[in-house]
Amino acid sequence: GERHVHKLAHEATPPFDSTQAAHQDVVQQTKALLAEYAALKASDKDLVALLDPNTSTLAARRRQIRKKIKELSSYGAYELACCNLYGV
């Protein structure tokens, strides 16, 4: 299931190869997404509150943070780059 899926990433993720365009694209799109997320953190009081472990349950906060990340304009390009890397 979704729980502990991070333990399987090393089995599915190919080793980084800076000569492959798909790998370079994931890096570029990740940087763009992280920059947009940082800007959102600086301006969105609701997001800052979600980062406080005393405001809600971890599951609820994660769900809301994921929603906010998926709404960022750079998320689509990031998701596409990851899909291209994994061949899905």
Image (spheres, helix red, strand yellow):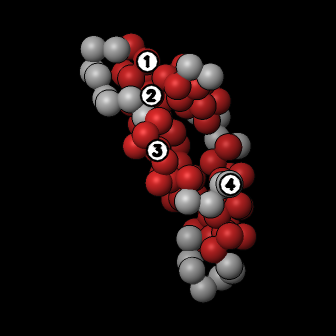
Report which residue position mark 1 lands on. Answer: 22
Dots 2 and 1: beta carbons under 8 Å?
yes
* Mark 2 to mark 4 CA distance (whole Å): 25 Å
Query: Which disc, if any, is residue 33?
Result: none
Q: Is residue 8 above or below residue 29?
A: below
| Amino acid type, label 4 | Gly
Of residue 23 and residue 31, the one placed in the foreground of this image is: 23
Q: Nearer the observer, disc 3 or disc 1? A: 3
Report which residue position mark 3 lands on. Answer: 9
| Amino acid type, label 1 | Ala
Q: Quadrant of residue 87?
A: top right
Of residue 22 and residue 5, the one placed in the foreground of this image is: 5
Q: Nearer the observer, disc 2 or disc 3? A: 3
Q: Residue at x 60, y 31 (%)?
A: 79
- Quadrant containing the N terminus in the rendered view: bottom right
- Quadrant containing the C terminus in the rendered view: top right
Percent x, y of residue 69: 63, 48
Report which residue position mark 4 lands on. Answer: 1
| Amino acid type, label 2 | Val
Q: Nearer the observer, disc 2 or disc 4? A: 4
The image shows a total of numbered marks equal to: 4
Question: Label 3 crowding class (10 Å Cα cut-off): few <14, some 14-19, many 20+?
Answer: few
Element at badge 2? helix
* Mark 4 to mark 1 CA distance (whole Å): 27 Å
Query: Which of disc 3 and disc 2 is earlier in sequence?
Result: 3
Q: Residue furthest bottom?
A: 54
Of residue 12 and residue 31, the one placed in the foreground of this image is: 12
Question: Label 4 crowding class (10 Å Cα cut-off): few <14, some 14-19, many 20+?
Answer: few
* Mark 2 to mark 3 CA distance (whole Å): 15 Å
Question: Label 1 crowding class (10 Å Cα cut-off): few <14, some 14-19, many 20+?
Answer: some
Report which residue position mark 2 lands on. Answer: 26
Q: Residue at x 71, y 61 (%)?
A: 64
